[in-house]
Image: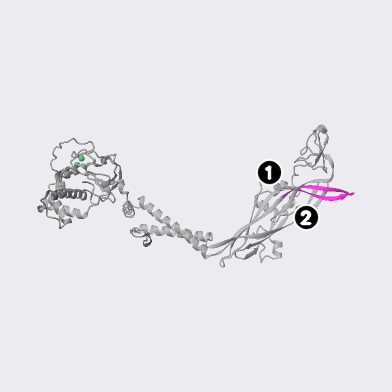
């Protein structure tokens, strides 16, 4: 065996000459190529991508007049409604407020919603605090209103009593406020910097631009933002909420197709069905402090507002030969689809049954494990050769058929047989059947098979009942005719001693065995032609009996048909 290092194995291909299959192949390949190119261009698979790094600032503008309980009409500007602190990537607009005026440090009854109802001082604890209360209990039970008494607390008094925000929202006119968003981005891999306020935008443009007709305008009306997020501003203003302003940068930095512009989209980020949600909206508290007659007072605001979170994401791509090669490499496997589809078409006979069978024979070479014993069987009354699996438990006549194959003639044998038959003028009628002197087994249809102890030998020359092939004149002439067999043996071994000179008993017995084997081979070449690849032809019991009768073993012993000698290319019978 050649060393593994000195050899190279490659696949063997089958070429089918067919205009239809050829054009189908090229059409499929062209379709796949087209798909690959479209995906490459559409998803810019030839580019190397980098993610955006960005910074955002927002500037809200607008003033609103409103009526606050206890304060009358007031005007709020950006310092009032933007809330006390600003996150880096978000801004806040207060839209609704509950005001509690003139709170001072002192003692007062807690409102029933957050405090504890009581009848006597004993019901109240001293110096304790609960999660919902506004102050520290003093231990006394005092009147809250005409009907209820609650525990007294030390706290900022009076305590905030309203829990539900006013409807409509106090600052519903915040809808008309505008915000200028400044977004600087950078793609570090390409050292590319850009702003959403483009170089060509000047002061006059920014004063006049409107998002309704210019999608690049960086100034947004809050009412429009909320509407484009699919919400109603006046409803949302009551309890507040969170709106996301998404800025997407999808930049193509290749010279010819250079394009890098922001795209804005809006959506609500918090749960928007306030009647189904516990603690809906968005609120917080802040206070304004002042001194009145040396005593500190404060005004407490429970503010409901809309927080706008600005989310920047995106990528930039630039041509990269490595990415292109990687993409092309990853798409090569798709061309195998053509092979899979066409093989399927051919094998399922969707295309043409003849081509399918031909192709299958040429393409697939079956190799069976030699020990398994796959046999081929030929019956006189059937045109095809059956491939069967040999079993030691089941008689060969009833063995499972694995495949049915067309008979392929052995051209050399046909020529020889025809010339023999032409010379001899053989009478094609069967030789009269002598009444067999044994009982016919149940599986035999020809009446000339003898019983056998080995199931693998129980094979008749036919499926149905009828004359036996061993009784035919051709059998006599092609299989049993001694001069023909001797001529064949001489043809194979020209220097073997001539039949007339074989005198000794040893030579004769050897010669009989050789003739017997030659007769078996003649039978196989006649009945099977070229037996199906990797199968071993099986000779019916009647024919084996007839050949043994003609060329008997001197001691009457034959090795018979065994699994060991049933492997392909080994003589099947003795
Ligand atoms: Zn039979
Ligand atoms: Zn027979």
Residue 549 visible, this orientation: yes
197 sits to left or right of 543: right
Of mark 1 and mark 2, the one earlier in the sequence is 2
Residue 505 in the image: state x and y as whole percent. 12, 48
430 sits to left or right of 208: left
320 sits to left or right of 383: right
Which residue corresponds to mark 2? 79
Work out whether 512 lies above or below 49: above
Res. 185 image quadrant: bottom right
Relative to the observer, which residue lies in front, 328 or 538?
Answer: 538
The residue tagged with tag 1: helix, strand or loop? Answer: loop
Give the extent of the magenta segment.
Answer: 285-305
Work out whether 485 lies above or below 217: above
Residue 313 in the image: state x and y as whole percent. 62, 57
Question: Is residue 540 rendered magenta in the image?
Answer: no
Question: Is residue 293 rendered magenta in the image?
Answer: yes
Majority secondary structure of magenta residues: strand
The residue tagged with tag 2: helix, strand or loop? Answer: helix
């Amino acid at each position: 065996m050649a060393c593994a290092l000195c050899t190279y194995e490659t696949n063997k291909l089958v070429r089918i000459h067919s205009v239809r299959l050829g054009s189908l192949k090229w059409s499929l390949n062209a379709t796949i190529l087209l798909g690959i190119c479209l995906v490459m261009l559409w998803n810019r698979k030839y580019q190397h991508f980098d993610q955006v790094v960005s910074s955002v600032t927002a500037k809200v503008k607008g003033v609103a007049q409103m009526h606050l309980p206890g304060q009358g009409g007031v005007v709020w500007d950006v310092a009032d409604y933007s809330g006390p602190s600003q996150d880096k990537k978000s801004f806040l607009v207060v839209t609704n407020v509950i005001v509690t005026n003139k709170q001072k440090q002192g003692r007062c009854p807690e409102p029933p919603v957050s405090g504890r109802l009581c009848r006597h001082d004993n019901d109240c604890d001293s110096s304790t605090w609960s999660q919902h209360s506004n102050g520290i209990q003093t231990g006394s039970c005092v009147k809250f209103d005409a009907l209820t008494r609650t525990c007294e607390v030390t706290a900022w008094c009076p305590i905030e009593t309203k829990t539900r925000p006013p409807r409509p929202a106090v600052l519903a006119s915040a809808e008309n406020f505008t915000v200028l968003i400044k977004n600087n981005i950078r793609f570090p891999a390409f050292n590319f910097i850009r702003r959403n306020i483009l170089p060509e935008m000047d002061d006059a443009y920014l004063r006049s631009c409107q998002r309704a007709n210019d999608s690049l305008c960086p100034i947004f009306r809050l009412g429009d933002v909320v509407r484009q997020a699919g919400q109603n501003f006046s409803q949302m203003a009551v309890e507040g909420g969170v709106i996301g302003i998404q800025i997407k940068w999808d930049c193509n930095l290749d010279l010819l197709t250079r394009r890098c512009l922001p795209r804005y989209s809006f959506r609500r980020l918090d749960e928007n069905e306030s009647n189904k949600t516990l603690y809906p909206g968005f609120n917080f508290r802040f206070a304004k402090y002042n001194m009145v007659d040396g005593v500190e007072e404060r005004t407490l605001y429970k503010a409901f507002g809309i927080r706008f979170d600005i989310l920047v994401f995106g990528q930039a791509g630039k041509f990269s030969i490595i990415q292109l090669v990687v993409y092309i490499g990853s798409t090569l496997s798709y061309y195998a689809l053509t092979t899979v589809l066409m093989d399927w078409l051919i094998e399922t006979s969707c295309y043409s049954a003849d081509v399918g069978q031909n192709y299958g024979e040429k393409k697939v070479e079956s190799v069976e494990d030699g020990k398994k014993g796959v046999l081929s069987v030929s019956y006189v009354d059937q045109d095809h050769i059956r491939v069967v699996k040999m079993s030691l438990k089941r008689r060969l006549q009833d063995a499972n058929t694995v495949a049915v194959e067309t008979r392929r003639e052995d051209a050399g044998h046909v020529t020889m047989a025809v010339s023999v038959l032409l010379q001899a003028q053989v009478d094609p009628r069967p030789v009269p059947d002598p009444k067999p002197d044994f009982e016919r087994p149940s599986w035999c249809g020809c009446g000339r098979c003898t019983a056998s102890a080995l199931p693998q030998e129980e094979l008749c020359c036919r499926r149905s009942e009828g004359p036996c092939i061993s009784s035919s004149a051709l059998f006599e002439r092609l299989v049993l005719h001694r001069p023909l067999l001797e001529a064949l043996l001489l043809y194979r071994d020209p220097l073997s001693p001539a039949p007339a000179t074989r005198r000794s008993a040893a030579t004769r017995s050897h010669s009989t065995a050789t003739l017997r084997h030659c007769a078996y081979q003649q039978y196989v070449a006649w009945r099977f032609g070229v037996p199906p690849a990797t199968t071993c032809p099986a000779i019916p019991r009647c024919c084996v009996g007839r050949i043994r009768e003609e060329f008997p073993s001197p001691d009457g012993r034959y090795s018979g048909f065994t699994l060991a000698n049933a492997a392909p290319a080994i003589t099947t019978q003795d």
